[in-house]
Image: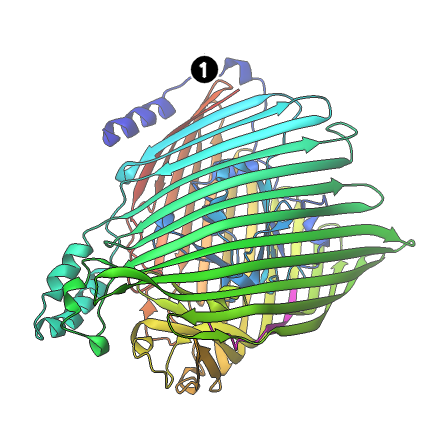
């Protein structure tokens, strides 16, 4: 059926359709100009940080199904996505910072990074509801956000227009994968607009396990079989399950504009819910996420520009895994449960509150002041239920809990002298952790309250040599507090690799240097070159848990959060866009990234109620940070043939890199090519055919899993 559907769509795309498009024949057809502006309306050449803005039109042209598929084609962005679109999450990173918490993710100016882990899940927001994506690289990319060490990614959602509009889109493809998107935008009154959307994703899934990893497990479990148990057979049976994801998202936005839609002031009330269920290719291995967000924001453009808001997040997250053996803890009496029953379930409810404000206004003739404030409060419970082998039942075994408040205030002065713009900033950050404890069936361990604060200066300059050429440079300091999960959590990421919190974790900081140029000789051509260097201090990294701890399992399948004394990231980003003809746009970018652990002393760590000192940290000095290739590149073109078809071709190269900070698992380089064909039938119907990973390249982002390979999708979108 899939072959017939693709053949039908190809036929429709290739057959002339002048009668359906006659009403559009007189309208000139051309792609967007290369020159872009920031969401504030500023030319990106005037910003102190390298910035890329991706518009709705560009998003429509890419063979992208989720926000991550758009981000990965930008210079400097690396993406950890071992299951492709079928996984529980992904982790975009910038400029060699190996943890996604170093990038500040924002939605309509409000932070998305969760207090629980510091990171964000971009697939929470359906791509059909996104109007624009801005990627700002480096520590000078944002005046707010404790996570903006590597840069900031801001997602602007759609807003109600002047007319009532509605759309519905359906796609179907490989592995019986389907998605449905629906949305409506209505003008209720001259001052009140409404936007609502819904997204549903479903699939039969695929076999995600790496053959090499399966073989290594079988070899290890064969040793257990010699002791009297058929562990290998149970393991083989358990991994017959497929990687499956089912997701539903709904959102609504009510916009009140006191002076009408074209006015300068807009109040928005947003609410969204997201349910994401993932079965991780193994019996009794599941992730469940239920998330509700609401936000009230103000946006005012005038003599004083204001962007402010408050938001609330309520989430219930849980994961399950089977009862599994390790060679050091093998027990013949327990072996009857291996891979046959659920072994552990973690239930992690959390609440997250935030308030932020950003004001910008002229100060005198040559200056512009920017003032920003941000306050965040979050709570976490990590409740673990484990199998009691003696009775064969799940019982509550552990509970970890904590609360955290973070705040910051920023003042930035932008001074313009003819062609030179200076940016001077100072940021104050503060953190408090309290009411934290660990409890098991016999012991209650209370942790000391903690506070920390930092001052971070920032300096940047932009010099316009001409209208078409700008030089920029900056130096800045940034810092970040440990997340609640990195201090008190125990969770799997990916399945089979347990990450352990460390209550003794300290705040991290970095000093970043950047210099570059941006050239726009015409509306059709852009060239950018940026070099960067970052010194990281007390960088928070999850590493093998090698210490004198009583729980021997930690030495084999777990990693524990520690502070790396000093690390370095450095590199270069080159990007260009060229439109040689109306309807043809070419793009390419290349990123070189060097990362290194310079100093990693032995740390005192805390696991549950045990305190110990690590034993193998020094061995990691000289290693690369995980998941960061030396070389990566993207290239492609978009060709719009009037009254016929739009064609998009994108290629991505990712070089060799290490899965772990121990540098024991090296991942091969790979190249993928994606295609998209789309055609409009009149003004209301658009059909598309996309092929992801055209040449069915096999690659890995971790040692256990392989992505789904070549996937073909056909879709139809109806708009009114």
User: Can you give x and y, in whole percent of width and height, for residue 549 in the image?
Assistant: 36, 83
Mark 1 — residue?
Answer: 18
Furthest residue toward right: 364
Say whether residue 559 is left or right of residue 155. left
| Circle 1 Cα neighbour tier, 10 Å, few/some/many (<14 / 14–19 / ≥20) | some
User: Can you give x and y, in whole percent of width and height, for residue 461 in the image?
Assistant: 75, 63
Q: Nearer the viewer, residue 130 or 652?
A: 130
- Image: 119 above or below 169: below
Say whether residue 545 is left or right of residue 338. right
Residue 95 shows in the view: no
Say whether residue 132 is left or right of residue 672. right
- Colour convention: rainbow
- Image: 384 above or below 23: below
Which segment is the magenta one?
Answer: 501-515
Quarter of the figure with residue 228: bottom left
- SS category of the residue bearing label 1: loop
What residue is at 23 percent from the left and 65 percent from the top?
213
- Image: 499 above or below 16: below
What residue is at 40 percent from the left and 68 percent from the top?
499
User: Can you give x and y, in whole percent of width and height, for residue 442 in the image?
Assistant: 38, 74
- Image: 102 above or below 123: below
């Amino acid at each position: 059926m899939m072959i017939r559907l693709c053949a039908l769509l190809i036929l429709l795309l290739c057959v002339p359709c002048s009668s359906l498009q006659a009403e559009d024949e007189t309208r000139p057809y051309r792609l967007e100009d290369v020159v872009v502006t920031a969401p504030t309306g500023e030319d990106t050449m005037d910003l102190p940080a390298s910035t890329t803005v991706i518009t709705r039109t560009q998003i429509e042209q890419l063979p992208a199904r989720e926000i991550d598929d758009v981000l990965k084609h930008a210079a400097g962005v690396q993406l950890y996505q071992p299951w492709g679109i079928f996984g529980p999450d992904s982790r975009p990173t910038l400029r060699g910072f190996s943890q996604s918490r170093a990038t500040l993710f924002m939605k309509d100016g409000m932070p998305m990074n969760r207090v629980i882990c510091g990171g964000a899940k971009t697939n929470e927001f359906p791509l059909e509801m996104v109007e624009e994506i801005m990627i700002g690289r480096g520590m000078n990319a944002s005046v707010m956000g404790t996570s903006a060490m590597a840069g900031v990614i801001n997602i602007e959602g759609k807003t109600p227009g002047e007319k009532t509009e509605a759309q519905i889109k359906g796609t179907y493809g490989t592995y019986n994968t389907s998605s449905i998107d629906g949305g409506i935008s209505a003008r209720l009154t001259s001052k009140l607009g409404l936007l609502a959307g819904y997204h549903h994703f479903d699939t039969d899934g695929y076999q995600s396990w790496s053959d090499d990893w399966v073989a290594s497990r079988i070899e290890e479990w064969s040793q257990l079989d010699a002791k009297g148990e058929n562990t290998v057979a149970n393991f083989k049976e358990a991994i017959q399950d497929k990687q499956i994801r089912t997701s539903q998202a709904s959102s609504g936005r009510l916009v009140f504009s006191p002076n009408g839609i074209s006015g300068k002031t807009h109040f928005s009330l947003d609410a969204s819910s997201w349910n994401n269920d993932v079965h991780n290719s193994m019996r009794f291995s599941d992730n469940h996420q239920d998330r509700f967000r609401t936000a009230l924001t103000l946006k005012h453009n005038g003599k004083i520009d204001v962007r402010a808001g408050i938001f609330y997040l309520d989430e219930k997250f849980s994961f399950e895994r089977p009862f599994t053996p390790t060679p050091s803890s093998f027990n013949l009496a327990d072996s009857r449960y291996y891979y046959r029953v659920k072994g552990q379930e973690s239930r992690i409810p959390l609440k997250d509150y935030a308030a932020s404000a950003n004001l910008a206004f002229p100060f005198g003739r040559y200056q512009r002041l920017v003032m920003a404030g941000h306050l965040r409060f979050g709570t976490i419970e990590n409740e673990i239920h484990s199998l009691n082998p003696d009775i064969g039942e799940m019982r509550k075994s552990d509970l970890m809990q904590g609360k955290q408040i973070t705040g910051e205030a920023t003042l930035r002065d932008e001074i313009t002298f003819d062609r030179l713009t200076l940016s001077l900033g100072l940021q104050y950050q503060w953190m408090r952790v309290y009411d934290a404890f660990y409890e098991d069936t016999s012991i209650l361990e209370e942790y000391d309250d903690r506070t920390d604060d930092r001052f971070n200066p920032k300096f940047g300059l932009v010099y316009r040599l001409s209208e078409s050429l700008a030089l920029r440079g900056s130096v800045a300091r940034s810092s970040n507090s440990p997340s609640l999960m990195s201090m008190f959590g125990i969770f799997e990421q990916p399945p089979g690799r347990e990450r352990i919190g460390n209550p003794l974790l300290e705040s991290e900081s970095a000093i970043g240097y950047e210099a570059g140029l941006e050239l726009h000789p015409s509306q059709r051509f852009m060239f950018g070159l940026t070099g960067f260097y970052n010194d990281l201090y007390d960088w928070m990294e999850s590493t093998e848990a090698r210490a004198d701890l009583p729980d021997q399992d930690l030495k084999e399948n777990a990693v524990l959060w520690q502070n790396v004394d000093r690390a370095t990231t450095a590199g270069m980003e080159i990007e260009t866009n060229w439109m040689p003809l109306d309807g043809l746009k070419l793009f390419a970018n290349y990123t070189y990234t060097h990362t290194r652990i310079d100093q990693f002393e032995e740390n005192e760590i805390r696991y549950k109620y045990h305190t110990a000192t690590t034993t193998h940290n020094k061995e990691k000095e000289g290693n690369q940070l995980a998941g960061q290739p030396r070389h990566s590149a993207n290239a492609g073109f978009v060709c719009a043939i009037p009254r016929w078809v739009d064609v998009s071709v994108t290629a991505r190269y990712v070089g060799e890199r290490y899965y772990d900070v121990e540098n024991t698992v090296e991942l091969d380089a790979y190249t993928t090519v994606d295609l998209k064909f789309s055609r409009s039938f009149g003004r209301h119907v658009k059909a598309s055919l996309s092929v992801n990973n055209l040449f069915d390249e096999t690659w890995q982002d971790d040692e256990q899993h392989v992505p789904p390979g070549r996937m073909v999708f056909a879709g139809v979108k109806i708009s009114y």
